[in-house]
Image (tube, rainbow, N blue to C red):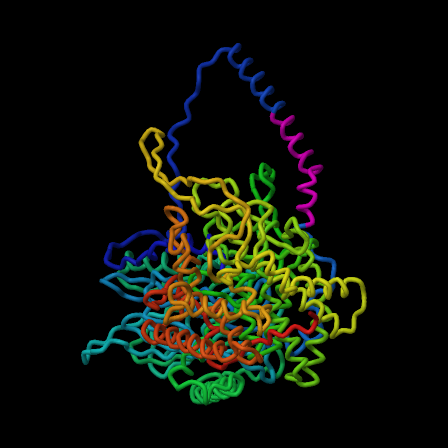
Amino acid sequence: MSGGSRRTARNRGRPPTIDASDGKSHRDSRPVDAVRKVRSRDHGPIRLMDVSLKTLLWLGFGFLAFISVFLLISNHHWESWHESPALMRLRRVVTPLQASKMMDLAQFQGEHKESLYWGTYRPHVYFGIRARTPQSLIAGLMWISMRNGQYFLRHVCQDSDDLSTYGWKDHNGRSYGRQLIVDHGLSFTTSFLKEKKEGSGFGGDWAVRLDLQNAKSIVHEGNEETTHLFFYIADEEGNSLNVKKQLFETRDATLLAFGTRNDIGGWELHLDSQRHVDTHFSGFRTHHMHNLTELVQGTLAFQARRTGELQLSDTIEESSNVVVIQISTVLPAKLDIAFVSGTNMEGSLVDQRLHSLTGDILSTRLDEKQKEFEDKYLRYFKLKDKVDSELMAVGRAALGNLLGGIGYFYGQSKIALPEGYTQKNGDKFISYWPAALFTAVPSRSFFPRGFLWDEGFHQMIIGRWDADLSMDIIGHWLDLINADGWIPREQILGAEALSKVPEEFVLQYSTNGNPPTLFLVIRDLLNGIRSSKFSPQETDEITDFLKRAYVRLNAWFQWFNSTQSGNDVNTFYWHGRDNATTKELNPKTLTSGLDDYPRASHPTDEERHLDLRCWMLLSADCMHSIAELLKMENDVTEDYHTMVKQLSDFEKLNQMHLDDVSGAYYDFGYHTEKVRLRWHERNQGTVQKELIRETLEKPQLKLVPHLGYVSLFPFMMGIIPPESPVLEKQLRLISNRSTLWTEYGLRSLSRTSSLYMKRNTEHDPPYWRGPIWINMNYMILSALHHYSQEDGPFKVTAGTLYQDLRSNLISNIARNYHKTGFLWEQYDQQTGKGKGQRPFTGWTSLVILMMSESYPSLQRRNS
């Protein structure tokens, strides 16, 4: 994952608390108005100036002169805007590729489209539901947690909430999920079920089961604490929602809210409880769904100060499009919330459908869905004889969290303008076209949005579970390709996604790429067809998918081939490194996905990046394989075949990147090891110290001697012949405890590297300079498995290392999960302890493929 925004995004303050201690009465007539009231600035009285006629004339001439100069400059600026080649190119950046859209394929219409309409597609909140439509009806859950005598409102996933655990134990990616949340004294399960029955509107109905328990070790009899939950429903389109106040005055009343929409017709939201609950409500009119927490929190704070009670106001603004229902109960409690659509249609059978979504029938259906999930999990990943029950539970949680972390986003990416240009309104960006993205997310708390680098690894898992679902996700990504063949590498679409990203990291740069990891999934699909893994119908659908995808994948490949190419034929380097920095010890390569992994100390266009060369080989091989499958015969197909041969040329690879003595592969570029950061004083009114980079030796054009993940890319991709002595040296490097090997997985950077665990700036700690990352370890494990199956003199050694590395990785991930309740972004190479962000159920979920020993074939047919 790209590290720049991630590390900054960690620094968020604790959520504001709800102060219920002040019982003073306030006389404001409308609590909602009071919450939204903004204090006006007192500018004081208007003062008149005594001025002469001469002064006024001079002021007038000066003003006219200023306007003239301004217009002259402005006209010149906007003439240059229209004529600048850079900005003409920028127009192409925000122009979609002229090709048939992936999501218009017949396989993504009809029943498929309707079956995925509703889902838990709001991964950034602890529990949220929406439809796959730009302006959806959305629903979600909030609750009050008490710590140190203060009240906190939980809603958006935040590490600062310090929950003991939260995450999906089961989720099938479509119609069912079960999540456990433990927030200090409160433990509860949120279950989701979706069904399509006779009479329902488009997409069907859904139900939420909230099963609440007291997590405290000691509960004093007669000392029952009230738990406050807030379930809301909101219409992003702005349609008015309705609530009947009188219904809350009776215990057996179930209707919470109702309304109507064009997509699903009439709808109703109902509550069913096995015990008495107190309910209150508030209705708001707003288009800012990312501020719902503040709306509810502000209303509660106002009410607490005014009445001394922690409850909503039982008021509704005119034309409210948000209704929040407060449900207060003592523990234990079980609540069912049912949503039925199509209620205004004849024969809608609302009562029957409600009955099937609550109570005992809902319990039965949830049990059935859980068993279906467990059976499919065991069947698809074949874990029964490979791992014990404890490890199977970890793998199931990894899968459930990955599928439960799929989100639907809609909006426009912000693309940075060329340096020196701004829009008339002062914006330094131009907007991509409005687009939807259906995607898995790396981390619900820190990165609840789409990352191109991560997505390929996500789909290696999801594709094995549900190929149709995976192709749907890949299709959404491919539809984001522009006229130049570029895809923005980080997708921040919509106000809710924007609210989680610091402003300085929102802009995307059209010169910057990211590893084309989607080809990892394309390779899996192609291998599946070759091995007859799919049914005839599935094979036909995958073939149709690849036929349409070929045009878009070709444009994407050509973008890399033209914009990331090096000076020599078939050499490549990641563009976007800062060659003028004075602050970074080694200029970062964010576009590679490996962020601060050390490259050449002095970036130039002479660089050759080994990892990008290998990504290009994978991509070219996939493109030629698709052409073979589709029986395409043209010059482009032959070009791909030729490129595969050239990039897999072992002797050429060794000439460019191999250190013969150590058997390690390295980048190439202008480099010196004699670079350091040293404190310098600067005087700007006050004396301040800052770390400045110093180069103590002239850099030379040579191999960059930093052993780590990049060095192993030819090994990961299976380029090294199984009989080559280079393979033996690679296995020695991997198994050497002084370089890469640990009891918890392989380090990202060797202990012998001069930049091992070194900070890159004063505020930039090591990221890919030592810690253990699961995506790269999975690829290395795949290669070890490959070479352990290939005839050659090093087959046994590869097999032994494979077994040991697999055991180390799985046991450490599982140990951390059982200890902390989470999967982690990375793991400490000295202690094995989880580091970085959590929950991180993106590519760390690859542990399930390690458990099931599911690896891609590294055989190339075209070399």
Q: Depth check: 702 or 11 in front?
A: 702
Q: Depth check: 809 or 156 in front?
A: 809
Q: Is residue 688 left or right of residue 257?
A: left
Residue 801 shown in magenta: no
Q: Depth check: 474 or 133 in front?
A: 474
Residue 839 in sight: no
> Which quadrant is the C terminus positioned in?
bottom right
Q: Depth check: 708 or 735 in front?
A: 735
Expressed as whole percent of the image width and height from the top left, the position of residue 305 reads 28, 56
Expressed as whole percent of the image width and height from the top left, the position of residue 317 reads 46, 59
Expressed as whole percent of the image width and height from the top left, the position of residue 21 reads 23, 58
Q: Main secondary structure of the magenta part?
A: helix
Task: Write down the region rendered in magenta.
Answer: 70-92
Against 203, residue 759 (above or below) is above
Q: Is residue 62 left or right of residue 111?
A: left
Residue 78 shown in magenta: yes
Numbered marks: total = 0
Q: Is residue 369 left or right of residue 188?
A: right
Q: Identify the image quadrant of residue 409.
A: bottom right
Expressed as whole percent of the image width and height from the top left, the position of residue 242 reads 49, 67
Furthest toward the right, the residue is: 634
Residue 540 in sight: yes
